[in-house]
Amino acid sequence: MGRAAPWAAMVMDARSGEVYHSDNADTSLHPASLTKMMTLWVAFEAVERGEITLDTMVTIPREAAAEPPSKLGLVAGQQIRFRYLLRAAAVRSANDAATAIAFAVSGSEQAFTERMTRTARAMGMTRTTFKNAHGLTETGHMSSARDMTILGRHMIYDWPQYYNLFSRRSTDAGVATVQNTNRRFLDAYVGADGIKTGFTNAAGSNLVASAERNGVRIVVTVFGAPGSAARNARVAELMDLGFARAPSQVALRRPERPPYLGNVAGATRLASAPVRSPRPQARPETVFAASNAERRIDPDLIAAAVAAAVDASSESTPREISATPPEPRPESLVVEAALQPPVEQEVIERLSTNSGRHWGINVGRYGSRYRAERVLLRVALNEMSTLDGALRRINESSHGFDANFVGLTRETAELACRRLQARGTTCFMIQPPS
């Protein structure tokens, strides 16, 4: 028998961030599946930024399929929509789904957990380091009651459109209907609507809970309970304390949204990350490369086209070359118009030769230039973080039209292919000419 995990707790007014009670709140402890709150936070951000869509088909890597329970029962090579992985991680606390999310967003679990830790630091979670996406015990994977309370508050205010996931007693996870691991507390405490449970032998029984009554919202975190019944009883007691101390009206001070830190190829860019990341506005014209077959990705244009292209971007794999090109749909016309050159404008761009940007990737061969253009734009929408600054190039041959991105470093090309292959998209690297 191992040593029992120490109790730790915090009670916070979600509206103002005021702390009404704390107990060992800054002690470094094992968070267990509370980790998945950050996994989901980053996943929601990736959807918002166009890195992936809710309907992207994700190919399950063997690393995810091999995770121990709790799990959804995913099999290596299986394909499943990204939205179902989010549901399984949030409601069932499925470890295989959490790892699959990491690979789909960042290409590897290590890259994803580094992004999780960067995001935690930007939120002010000073005692948190993530080593995996699911929360199973691992050396160095630690957090605190204060940090997890901060994260819980961010989940409420940063992602109101997704927060309802945490109050679902059950949900369709694509391959099965899964039950909420927190349903007993949700059913027992009036006003409870989330957020996340966690348990390992090293951590004990953990819970970040939130409840709202008459416009007052309280967040309570408990670490290290000996079991779920004792944990739920303690959380209910602390919730009552919070509601008793909270004023009926208080100035709402939403937590400041952390800057977009994204995926990093090679060296970290945390030190130079922008302070704010407002959504770009559509621009009246587009910057084009020297020819129609080779164009530089314009992040502002891509961001403006996301809403119109989301249906097209949900297709995760290219069709066969012999397939008949689909008729353009009304909502895709904005994207197709963006591909047409302006009547009187020529902007010459040169391929950068510094930093070893001589590598490329191929994302399929298609039967028409139109199909290749569509796939290149769709991939660019999903991979803005890794393909920003790359050139789109179509190479025509007797065999078809190859859709390529060029002007990449070897590290960036490898990362892009790992991420695309994790989603089931064809990708292979193109070496520089010798």
Image: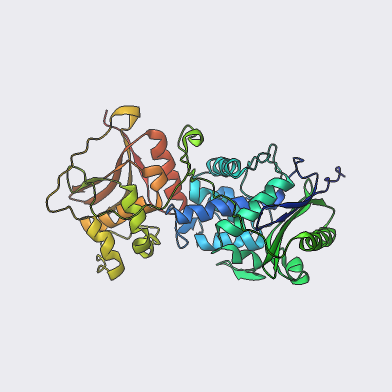
Is residue 367 in view from this perspective? no
Instruction: Tell me residue 272's x, y (percent).
Output: 47, 34
Instruction: Tell me residue 428's x, y (percent).
Output: 36, 44
Q: 126 above or below 79?
A: above
Residue at 30 percent of width and 46 percent of height: 297
Instruction: Tell me residue 254's x, y (percent).
Output: 59, 55
Residue at 57 percent of width and 53 percent of height: 41
Q: Nearer the viewer, residue 432 or 203?
A: 203
- Quadrant for residue 389, please give it: top left
Residue at 20 percent of width and 48 percent of height: 293
Taking the image as shown, residue 311 lies to the left or right of residue 166, namely: left
- Quadrant for residue 358, please give it: top left
Taking the image as shown, residue 86 lies to the left or right of residue 57, namely: right
Q: Nearer the viewer, residue 225 or 108?
A: 225
Instruction: Tell me residue 26's x, y (percent).
Output: 75, 41
Q: Nearer the viewer, residue 142 or 190?
A: 190
